[in-house]
Amino acid sequence: MLSKRPVAVLLILAVLLAGLAPGVMAQEPIKLTVLTHWGEERLLVAQQAMIDEYVAAHPNVSIELQTVPFEELLTRIVTSRTAGTSPDIYHIYNLWLPEFTNGGLLAPMPEDLAAWVSENAAATSVVGVTYNDQLWGVPTEVNTYLLLYNKRLLAEAGYSEPPKTFEELVEIASAITKKDETGAVTQTGFAAITGWDSGVVHPFMALLYSNGGEYFNEDFTEVAFGNQAGLEVFQLYQDLLDSGGMDTSISGWDFPNGTVGMIIMANWWRATLRASENIDYETEVGVAPIPVGPSGTESSTLAYNWLWSVDANSPNQEAAWDFVEWMNTPRGEGEPSPMGNFLVNELGAIPSLLPDQAAFAEDLGDHFLAPFVASTAYARQEPVIGGSQEIKSLLQVEIESLFTGMTDPQSLIDYVVPEANAILEEFRAGAGG
């Protein structure tokens, strides 16, 4: 049994602790988990350095970094949610916003942070992280697609300038392709990256927009690529295959190996190209606008975003948003944010936040990135519509079937368009809209 004196002491301590509750709570240990698809060793090191810096200034916070390959990221997010093991912070692709927000997966942004993003991010990136008139995270890199070409291979084929039209693309590509004495293709004029939805569908959308086409109709109730403009893009692929300008035995991933003349690709590939020993980044890698199709009048392209978001089930949402905000806040006047530094120096990407773009103006002005930065002014943001991811996967499979001769342009349209429209209708019905 306790004596009266120890009991009194305990009561006094309880009162004091109650009075100190806010301060004590602020120092309670908090563990955050962060999930990204940046799993390469050098990227892990750079991400861990950011985490270590934040933790050093916030000793009550510990942060566990989890990474998975991009192709596993969506599955990991869904399965961890189902298992009740969701991370606190996600780095996500903006096309997933409709399903994630309608499913209650994401926490709303703090209003002050959302307002700051609206004022300090590029306009196309603000659109990219908005769904149902609400911002859902802090945009990281903005990516657009342009035509990459190997200057040396074009010159060897007799061309000093990249193609400006679909017709020129077919002509130059066929001139670049080479075969060995057995008939095997050893060098292809144009290549695509298959087995990856964005690698197949994003270049298609860039070509579609440059041919005056649309991906969706105005109210997003139907796909709009089943018309002449869409057919001409699918026919472009067929013409490339028929002319020998494209051969699926060589992948677009081989562009850094110097065996591909041209590919439509995003700016985030810069780090890979700079590291390649088989193509000289400075003298051989060229960047040009997307060729214009017969129904188009000017080059256009596609833009998409990634963003930091917080899980709605996180017990530490305030701390999670604080870490996200810290990563994206400039260190000082004219200085980049920690995330901006990571994006530019580790990924070679274009940061979405204007203070980072200003801080890295010289780096973003090199011969490779400058055209991509310029394209953000006219690029069209990938529509963030419910059902888009499913349609994208469907279209990927059918375009790959076209590449392998399993279908033809008109049959592709006849199959994909009604299937895609059914997906849109199903999503609207499920969302109650």
Image (cartoon, rainbow, N blue to C red):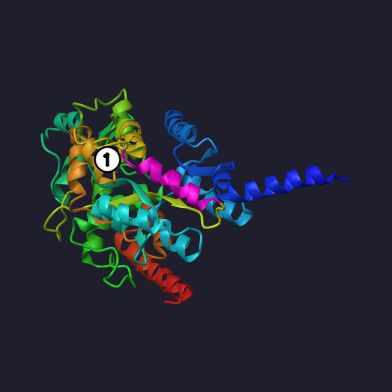
227 falls in the magenta region: no
Three-letter code for the amino acid on which mark 1 is drawn: Asp
The residue beneath circle 1 is 356
Q: Furthest-front residue in view? A: 5
**Residue drawn 47% across the image and 46% down it:** 71
Q: Nearer the viewer, residue 4 or 165?
A: 4
Q: On the picture, is 130 further left or further right than 228?
A: right
Q: Furthest-top residue in view? A: 277
Q: Nearer the viewer, residue 99 or 307?
A: 307
Q: Furthest-right residue in view? A: 1
- In percent of width and height, residue 63 lies at 53, 39
Q: Bounds of the magenta span?
A: 316-330
**Residue drawn 20% across the image and 36% down it:** 361
- In percent of width and height, residue 415 lies at 38, 66
- In percent of width and height, residue 268 lies at 32, 39
The reply to whether residue 245 is in sight is no
**Residue drawn 57% across the image and 55% down it:** 81
Where is 65 relative to 213, above or below?
A: above
Q: On the picture, is 278 further left or further right than 72?
A: left
Secondary structure of residue under mark 1: helix
**Residue drawn 30% across the image and 47% down it:** 142
